[in-house]
Amino acid sequence: MSTSAGATDRAGTELVHDGPVDTYAVAGAGGYVGRRLVAGLVGDGRPVVGLGRRAAQIPDAAEKRPTDVADTAATARALAGVDTAYYLVHSMAGGHGFTGRDRALAESFAAAADEAGVRRIVYLGGLGHGALSEHLRSRQEVGVALASSGVEVVELRAAVVIGAGSISFEILRYLTERLPVMICPRWITTRVQPIAEADLLRYLVAAPHVAPGIYEIGGPQATTYRDMIATYAAVRGLRARAIVDVPVLTPWLSAWWVDLVTPVDRRVSHSLIESLTTDVVVNDPAPAATAFDIDPLDVAGAIRAALDEQAGRVSASLLRFDPGLRDGVYAMRSEAPLPAADVAGVQSDLRRCGGDLRWYGLAWAWRLRMLLGRAFGERLRLGRPPALEPGAAVDWWQVAHVSDDALVLRTSSWFCGEAWLGFRMHEAPRPRLVQVVALRPRGVVGLVYWWALWPAHVVVLRIASRHRARRARRGRG
């Protein structure tokens, strides 16, 4: 196996490599944390092996080794040549009995790591002390099981992760965005010490270079779920949410209430909500402060970073979005066939965007939209940039991406939330134009806007596809 003795900066990235770079494996590479960790490790130039039951869910950036960690022998073969293995596996989505499954999976993985000669396991567990919920108790039992084979273990214990895609953050997002008034049980005052997604990734990336042991990690302050809701509303520019405390709403009833209001995976959210009555704060910050050179974000900064990072991801991947709702973002998609002779015309027309509502098609509908926005304080103006390049202003949009065959526009100036408009030309297997629109609603107004205009958006998107083709034919003529 290779060895590495690199120093890490405050972002957790390696500054010096004394010899060959270690190989890392990420078990659970298709999950929320796993996908982001793979991207971070690969971006830092580290060889990464992705483990998961389905190859399609493992990020393409990793070497895919589809594996069920319940199969010890197969997992040992998949870990061949690996120096450090990240364990990000849980089975809460399997429902009742997940604690036994989690313990068995961890024991199997630990045995496989020992057989394969893995030097270290890095595990992301959960904070909590004293009487714990089933979920939190299971997280800590998994840490014990991973250490059972003798492979050295770094266990990072964290609470709520603030990042788009985190179940806990998505519950916070949907409740705050959709409910100006909430009736909440006593757990609204439970103490919690959340951590920003970016900071969590820094800890994970740096974990192979610290001494084995248990490290409690979190942001700089402990807070409550009530205060987190208030902070999210302030960062998002929403009015303060009214919260009415009641002593009778149990975690079990809360779970069904969350099911009603939010679209998160109930198989996981129910287990998490049962833990809301337990304080999850850092009791001993000294070990992590000594071992890691990380200055974590506070709650407001973490929420702001999560929203900004998600907006960047949407801009980068908009044209791959499927229709529907994911992590607070609604998307619609349309495809229109084109004659091969019109492909160049559409590409040329996309570069002439802006400055005229007729470019969008249905100019009268856009005028109505601009009038609607004025009632909410919007002041949308037309304008074409001297050069179409990332960051250029096009009407009320900014260019997020432009290439020979694609254009993505983004705006944060709409009253109803952040919006994206994207186009891509595909020439194979048949010429066609793909259009994608997306909205991250801001508050109830944004949600009402999306659903009230959803039928109109369906029609407009189809008409806009034909409009692009007509403009291309006119330009060719």
Image (spheres, rainbow, N blue to C red):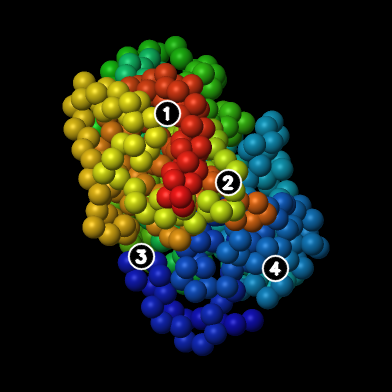
At x 64%, y 56%, the residue is 428
Q: Secondary structure at mark 4?
A: loop
Q: Which residue is mark 2?
A: 338
Residue 394 lies, with reference to residue 93, above or below; the image says below
The quadrant in which residue 117 appears is bottom right
Give amino acid for label 4: Leu
Q: Which residue is mark 3?
A: 11
Which numbered disc covers residue 174?
1
Give amino acid for label 1: Tyr
Category of crowding for the residue at label 2, using alpha-carbon neighbours closer than 10 angstroms: few (below 14), some (14–19), many (at least 20): many
Question: Farthest residue toward the bottom?
Answer: 19
Category of crowding for the residue at label 1, using alpha-carbon neighbours closer than 10 angstroms: few (below 14), some (14–19), many (at least 20): some
Left or right of residue 251: residue 362: left
Give amino acid for label 2: Leu
- Looking at the image, tell me whether mark 4 or mark 3 is earlier in sequence order: 3
Which numbered disc covers residue 79?
4
Category of crowding for the residue at label 4, using alpha-carbon neighbours closer than 10 angstroms: few (below 14), some (14–19), many (at least 20): many
Left or right of residue 396: residue 147: right
Judge by depth and name the residue closer to the eye, 92 or 104.
Answer: 92
